[in-house]
Image (cartoon, rainbow, N blue to C red):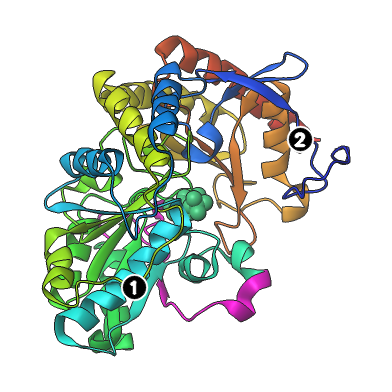
Amino acid sequence: MAKCPSDNVFYRDLNWHYPKIVRGEGIYLYDEDGKDYIDGCSGSAVANLGHGNKEVAEAMKKQAETIAFTHLSRFTTDAIKNLADKVAALTPGDLNKCYFVSGGSESTETAVKMARAYFLERDGVTSKFKIIARWNSFHGNTIGALSMTGHVARRKKYDPYLADFPHIAAPYCYRCPYDATYPECGVKCAYALEEEILRQGPENVAGFIAEPVIGSAAPGVHPPKEYYSIIREICNRYDVLMIIDEVMAGFGRTGKNFGIDHYEVVPDMLTTAKGMSSGYSPLGATIVKDKIYEVFAKGSGKFIHGHTYGGNPLSCAVGCAVLDIIEKEKLVENASIQGEYLMNKLQKLYDYPYIGDIRGRGLMIGIEFVKDKATKEPFDVKKDVKGLVTRKALDHGLVVYPGGGSVDGVRGDHFLLAPPINITRAEVDELFDRLDKAIKETCEELND
Ligand SMILES: Cc1ncc(COP(=O)(O)O)c(C=O)c1O
């Protein structure tokens, strides 16, 4: 790959050639040479409405002309209040109170601080502050969020800064951490939470955080049906807050409003971002149960925390427009229908020698490569299979979201498919055709 042309941008990967995108329309991105790409991962499961949406642009313009910014420490606006009402109508149970932020890392870090502050407010308990997380997880790149994140490659260089957040194994059935098979396994991976709480001391544990469907760290992986009710029960028993990270899965991506809705369990907190504004403006929220809010309301009345752009009216107006469109165009149902259709088509990819696992929910699907299907042995990292498939897909005009390290922190190649949730059946066919060509060529090259 050629080095990126010299300009004054400090890109993430200085060895990557960044095509210049000049516009987007629906599921397509267009570069300066007129080449089209299907945005098969909505950036990083963000652009749920696709690109160039005129209704959202109109709402942005209107809000910017009215009032774009007020600081949430002093004022409120209709845009902020309306968005909170719309979100509360979608969330399960009494998860109603929205603490607005600007993105996923802010929303997971807000959950950590709020959990700690909740126990302090409720009964002055100072010891209850630990948050248990899982391996094969991603909760963000800021130091607190990265401390929770269970992804070795993303943590490694910054290890000296990371705080001690305990981790348990993820419910990764294809590579069961207990070398067992469902249902005979007895869902040991859920009961591991109880063991860890006891190890840490329940008096020290404030929360447990997990992605309902895993995103970038092991895309599409999701637990058996009883997993989250077991987790809920354990959290109740030890007075531990159940925090579900819906940054990627939330707002329709998995074919339900929230990923946790597949499990009919009501957590104590949801962390959200990405699809909430569909990428039209940075936006996120930590959404909590009324009972948590009431503890603050009856206590000091203060949550000492906040970010400058949290709850800015412009992003909130975008959020309102996005949620209205999702409802009006029945896009949650569409994600479920097209997700099932895509998943059925993807089964054909198992004919290729190196496709080990295809899993997911709705339009949040992960595909994992293996060197050997029988042993599930991953490829040597030097082969850079994830890079290879990404380049092949781009050659064929398809953007996928690659990742690695799901097997042992280093090895394991996979990618996430998460196209806009308003994708049509014909567009799914086109996406699949491009993907099929990319996988075919990837496998051929790996054979050489
Ligand atoms: C599940 C999950 N949580 C948190 C984050 C962090 O979000 P952000 O990059 O907006 O800080 C991400 C980002 O990919 C995510 O997938």
Residue 179 in view, yes or no: no
Q: Position of residue 419 (x, y in %)?
A: 48, 28
* Image coords of residue 315 (percent x, y): 41, 40
The residue where tag 2 is placed is: 18
> Could you tell me the amino acid type at mark 2?
Tyr
Q: Name the residue under label 1.
A: 304
Question: Residue sitting at 45 percent across and 17 percent down?
Answer: 54
Q: Is residue 162 above or below residue 272?
A: below
Residue 5: give x, y in percent of width and height. 87, 37
Magenta stretch, residue numbers:
157-185
Give the number of the disc on residue 141: none
- The magenta stretch spans residue 103: no
- Pick the quarter of the image with the C terminus: top right
Q: What residue is shown at x 37% (from left), y 39% (from top)?
A: 276
Query: Which residue is the extreme one toward the top?
Result: 426
Nearer to us in this view, 209 or 416:
209
What residue is drawn where x is 50% and y is 59%?
Answer: 140
Tell me: 161 left or right of 339.
right
Query: Label 1 amino acid?
Result: Ile
Q: Which of 217 and 225 is in front in this view?
A: 217
